[in-house]
Image (cartoon, rainbow, N blue to C red):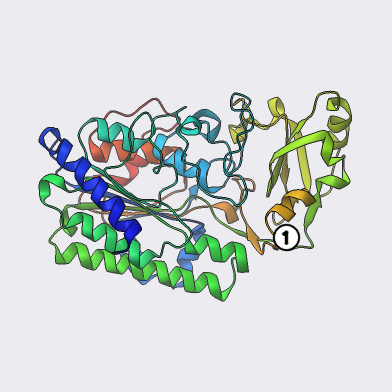
Amino acid sequence: MGIRIAMGFVLGLSLAFATAATAAPQTNTLIVISIDGFRADYFGRGLSPNLKTLAETGVHAKAMRPSYPSVTEPNHYTLMTGLYPDHHGIIDNVMVDAKMPGEVFGQPPYTFDSDPRWWNEATPLWVSAAETGIRIASSGWPGADGQIHGVRPDYLEPWNAHLVPGGQVQVVLNWLDLPAALRPGLILLHFDPVDEMGHQHGPDSKQVNAAIGQVDAALGDLIAGLKKRGLYDSTNLVILSDHGMTATGPERVIWLDDLFPAKDAVVPSFGAYAGVDPLPGHEAEIEKAMLKPHAHMTCWKKAEIPARLHYGSNPRVPQIWCMADDGWLVITRAIAAAYGNKPLWGNHGHDIADPKMAALFVAEGPAFKDGETIPEFPNVDVYPMLTKLLDITAQPNDGDDTLLKAALH
């Protein structure tokens, strides 16, 4: 066990001893696994036999529709709150807030930001569960590194770019080797390689296929480890993704610098979309430049973003919002330089109606129906189901019981 992992493990162990006497009994363990960037149709490539077996014996959705924008941190928080990003406050992977002048969430080089001020607009599943006495563990889950509403997971392996799925599974199994009184009842596990390879090489690359196999092998190790410990039959597994992936390339880039002087606006959001905040005195000229028709991009004032996207009311959303067509990117040259001018061969964040943005959903365990295929559903419905599995009270949310009724006995 490396020093970083050991420190998090020991810290969590001490916290667990402090709370064990008052912890609520936990009948079944819930493990939620996010395979970042696993597009729904990757399942059909025949590269994930362990995932296929779980789908055949449990519940498999044809697709899960992400929330807008279809990027990592907003959707991971939606899964844990049942709220659209506009309502829980994590409106993008990179954002600013007028109440926090000079602060940038996820500034280059991009990393998960654990400052609780960004996250406290909502109460995630793990905080509600911890407040009932359920012990929480997290490996790499976006947002869980921070002390949200004063709560941090009992056992924590913080996200970093060097996490490897097989190693993460071993950490999880170590947590499950704890005495029953100290064992986590909710485990959050986030795998990154499929998304990373999608960005670097494109969704149809051999590298993405290899990453699918790597993650599936880790799932196999987890299943084998649960069975070896006699825990498989008392564990509910929920395996999903945050979004899909589409092919991009350096020849499909819209440079905002060509539309208005970069010095006249702040551009906190970029990629498959762009968010633009004109500086005082430049509002009219930038609105004129951005709100006219464009090839491969549609722009709106934030109040006019289509209602089906459930986006635009949060103060953190920039004043002008643009969505690129499938496979196109929107950025400034200065931002591209800050990220090393590296070409992206795959990306996400596009229209949630695009099948290429569709996400994975598979679930198996004692609470789930056997061999059930269910229709596509929005990912806000995951949270109500998870609260049911943990037998805790759901916070107000945007989901309903559609998934709960379709998936559970």
The residue depicted at 54 percent of the width and 73 percent of the height is: 207
Which residue has dot 1 on it?
341
| Residue 204 percent across, percent down from the top left | 59, 70
The residue depicted at 24 percent of the width and 51 percent of the height is: 10
Q: In the image, is 43 to the left or to the right of 153? A: right
The residue depicted at 26 percent of the width and 52 percent of the height is: 9
Q: Residues within 10 Å of mark 1 (few under 14, many from 20)?
A: few
Q: In the image, is 13 to the left or to the right of 80? A: left
Q: Closest to the observer: 161 or 384?
A: 161
| Residue 72 percent across, percent down from the top left | 52, 48
Q: Closest to the observer: 313 or 370?
A: 313
| Residue 353 percent across, percent down from the top left | 60, 46
Q: Secondary structure at mark 1?
A: loop
The residue depicted at 26 percent of the width and 35 percent of the height is: 130
Task: Please state, as top left, top right, bottom left or bottom right, where the N terminus lies in the image.
Answer: bottom left
The amino acid at mark 1 is Asn
Q: Closest to the observer: 189 or 303?
A: 189
Task: Please state, as top left, top right, bottom left or bottom right, where the C terminus lies in the image.
Answer: top left
